[in-house]
Amino acid sequence: MDGNGRWANRRGLTRNEGHQRGVENVEKIVEKAGQLGIRYLTLYAFSAENWKRPQSEVDALMKLLKSFLKKQQKHLLENEIRLHTIGRVEELPHSVFRQLKIVKEATKHFAKNHLILALNYGARNEIIDAVKRYTEAFQSGAENLGDLHWGILSQYLDTSELPDPQLVIRTSGEHRISNFLLLQSAYAEYVFSPVCWPDFSPDLLETAIEDYRNRERRFGKTGEQVRQEQDVSLKSTAQ
């Protein structure tokens, strides 16, 4: 969700005002995602590198995050959406971490729809943490190094309970991944939007998804193989 600061600068507003508008847009996008039947929505809200920003901006972001969590708890409960987090959330300010725990606990019994917040998240940190957890399991005898494969290693990532992303959207015209789900998005489709996050409307989300649906995902196969498999699947469904 990139471009809050640039959006504000172009309008003579403060960066914090841009972040406020960005939070307001999150609410619209979460609602639209539910209408479109998206069961898993991950929002990259605060990266591990964002601590480098001016302290006043970091403090404002943390305040907005806490406010967002309090406000959204009712919406999540009413719509039966489970809140997850990825990243080193224990390093967040105590009041924010406490609010996260409250909302996660209140929604943990929901199974159909999921909202994932990436907070103090960086894919490289996640990989390091996963290797540490796997190493501890190996040393305790719970894992056998000779049996290691992606399915096992993925269970030590922050996203162990979540499916890999199918579509990654980056706003504001930047064309880089910025340390986001590097392993999990190995086969994801990407949409790079020139629109800054506060202006990334629900309609633009729907357009991005339509774009995704029109793409052919081959996973190493030929296009002909994929189309043949689709034909077989359609015939099987018809029968």
Image (cartoon, helix red, strand yellow):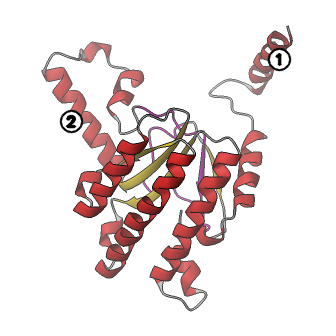
Front in this rendered view, residue 188 or 91:
91
Residue 80 occupies which quadrant of the picture? top right
Q: If you read the primary sequence from the N terminus, does the residue marked by circle 1 or circle 2 appear first?
A: 2
Magenta span contains residue 182: yes
Identify the element where label 1 is drawn.
helix
All told, the count of numbered labels is 2
Residue 4 x %, y %: 53, 74
Is residue 64 visible to us here?
A: yes
Q: Residue visible at 66% across and 67% down?
A: 194
From the viewer's perspective, is 115 left or right of 152?
right
Q: Residue visible at 39% across and 44% down?
A: 106
Give the crowd class for mark 2: few <14, some 14-19, many >=20 residues within 10 Å.
Answer: few
| Magenta region, residue range | 161-186
- The residue that mark 1 highlights is 234
Task: Mark 1 and mark 2 in contact? Answer it, CB < 8 Å.
Answer: no
Front in this rendered view, residue 105 or 209:
105
Q: Image height check: is 69 above or below 76?
A: below
Residue 60 occupies which quadrant of the picture? bottom left
From the viewer's perspective, is 238 left or right of 198?
right
Q: Residue visible at 43% across and 42% down?
A: 107
Amino acid on which the number 1 mark rests in the picture? Leu
Q: CA distance from mark 1 to mark 2?
A: 44 Å
Quarter of the image with the C terminus is top right
- The residue that mark 2 highlights is 132
Amino acid on which the number 2 mark rests in the picture? Lys
Q: Image height check: is 130 above or below 235?
A: below
